[in-house]
Amino acid sequence: MICHLKEHEFVYGKLESVAPGIRRLTARNPSAFTFHGTGTYVIGQGQVAVIDPGPLDADHIQALVEGLSAETVTHILVTHCHLDHSPAARELKSYTGALTYGFGPHGEMTKGVAEPVEEGADLDFVPDVRCAHGDVINGLGW
């Protein structure tokens, strides 16, 4: 049997260090799918990358922008196009001017007549830079 960590300490609206050079901001969207909330990660110090900016939630976006106000966001990385991961990328880009990186927009609205794409898909996200499996993205110090 696999044991899962069911508790971790965090504060909504606050960037918290989880490992050297890695910080997390937890969105206030708890559910069975997101646990306590979607994790937005910040990599580096000074010049940073934001991974999965999160849902389109004004408080989450504002906390991220304020938490990084003394730093420069150089990259916005989106791991996949779900409504809890990618919609805030547009807002963060408008604040920072950083390019967005991802595998591309979500798949077609339907894969076939009988197979609709899951309802949590973000069909609007299109990255500035399309990544392919195995690509390496580097920043200053990371």
Image: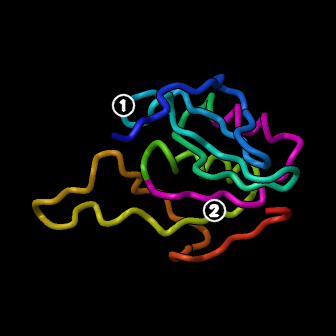
* Magenta region: 61-81
Residue at 67% across, 48% down: 92
Q: Report which quarter residue 27 is drawn in.
A: top right
Residue behind mark 1: 32
Q: Are marks 1 and 2 in contact (CB under 8 Å)?
A: no
Q: Is residue 24 left or right of residue 54?
A: right
Regarding residue 137, the answer to whether it shows in the image is yes
Q: Which quadrant of the rendered structure holds the N terminus?
A: top left
Image x and y of residue 84, in percent: 47, 42
Image x and y of residue 53, in percent: 60, 46
Regarding residue 29, the answer to whether it shows in the image is no
Measure how far apart labels 1 and 2 are at the Cα level. Answer: 28 Å
Residue behind mark 2: 100
Q: Height in image: 138 above or below 84? A: below
Image x and y of residue 86, in percent: 52, 50
Q: Is residue 83 left or right of residue 10?
A: left
Residue at 36% across, 51% down: 121
| Residue farthest along the left direction in this orientation | 114
Marked residue nearer the N-terminal end (1 or 2): 1
Q: Nearer the viewer, residue 41 or 109?
A: 41
Residue at 61% across, 43% down: 40
Q: Amino acid at mark 2?
A: Thr
| Residue farthest along the front direction in this orientation | 1
Q: Report which quarter residue 81 is drawn in.
A: bottom left
Q: Nearer the viewer, residue 3 or 56?
A: 3
